[in-house]
Amino acid sequence: MDSKIIAEVGAWVGEAQRIVALTGAGISTDSGIPDFRGPQGVWTRNPLAEKMSNIHCYLADAQVRKASWQNRLGSPAWSAQPNPGHLSLVELERAGKLHALITQNIDELHQIAGNSPERVIEVHGSMRRFMCWGCGMRGPMQAVLERVRAGEEDPHCRTCGGILKSDTISFGQQLVPEVIDRAMQAAGQGDLFLAVGSSLQVYPIAGTVEFGPDLAGEAGEDHRAVRAGRQRRHARAPCRGAPD
Ligand SMILES: [Zn+2]
């Protein structure tokens, strides 16, 4: 990004009152958490990982689950620390400018960095929690990982016997409508939309960029969208559906 763009975006941030940020895997790669699809991505290097991310394979195949638990044990996310990208979003919140932080990430690095949990909308869930596919119970992931460390290769729910997984949205699994609605609504309430480390290819949440101005209503007269990292998006409403 050249300095002219940085200065321009900096001025937008300075003027904004209600910033909505959307973050994707790209903000966490600097913390050592690999992207799924990038050149060093998990799927690029290990095709089995894609199978482990598929809910149908996961539920049907104990071998896939065993591999998944080993994978979770060794995740670089457990020792990852927030990087300056995360910290800058904490600064925005402390300055009273951050309306909402929508994230596609499951690593909770925003909360660890210091953003308030109530401002973070986790559209793909969190790997730091487990959930039971049978009874829906949720709890801290580390409690289940302890069981794996103690020798259980495919731990099941102690209440109902159901299959356990991380409390994240796997491929083939439905997004949580209430969470998506909340994200879309928040996107429409902002006066500046920052997309950080997201390729904006994963729908429906990438649609917050397009739908933001549509939902903006009274805030819509000056809605701007910025995509940091690769290219800049700048939209001044009324721009209903109009690509920039
Ligand atoms: Zn259960």
Image: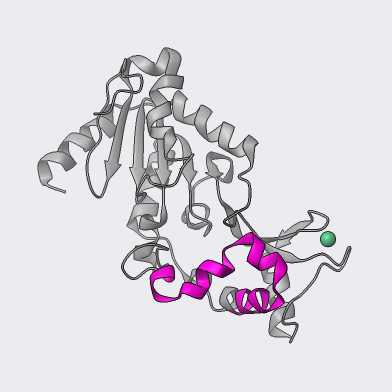
Q: Position of residue 241 (x, y in %)?
A: 35, 23
Is residue 36 left or right of 178 when viewed as pictured?
left
Closer to us: 45 or 57: 57
- 69 is within the stretch colored magenta: yes
Query: At 52% across and 60% down in the image, what residue appears?
Result: 107
Q: Estimate the x, y position of residue 131 in percent, counting from the top left.
A: 72, 59
Question: How many numbered marks appear?
Answer: 0
Q: Residue 151 sits in which quadrant?
A: bottom right
Q: Is residue 88 visible?
A: yes
- Residue plotted at (46% across, 69% down): 80
Residue plotted at (38% across, 68% down) = 41
Does the stretch in magenta take in 123?
A: no
- 145 above or below 94? below
Residue farthest to the right? Answer: 159
Give the quarter of the image for residue 231: top left
Compared with residue 177, is residue 199 higher up or lower down, i.e. above or below?
A: below
Image: 151 above or below 163? below
In this picture, residue 132 sits left or right of residue 34: right
Q: Quadrant of ligand 1?
A: bottom right
Q: Which residues are magenta?
A: 42-70
Q: Position of residue 100 (x, y in %)?
A: 48, 36
Q: Is residue 54 above or below residue 124?
A: below
Q: Residue at x 37, y 55 (%)?
A: 27
The C terminus appears in which quarter of the rendering? top left
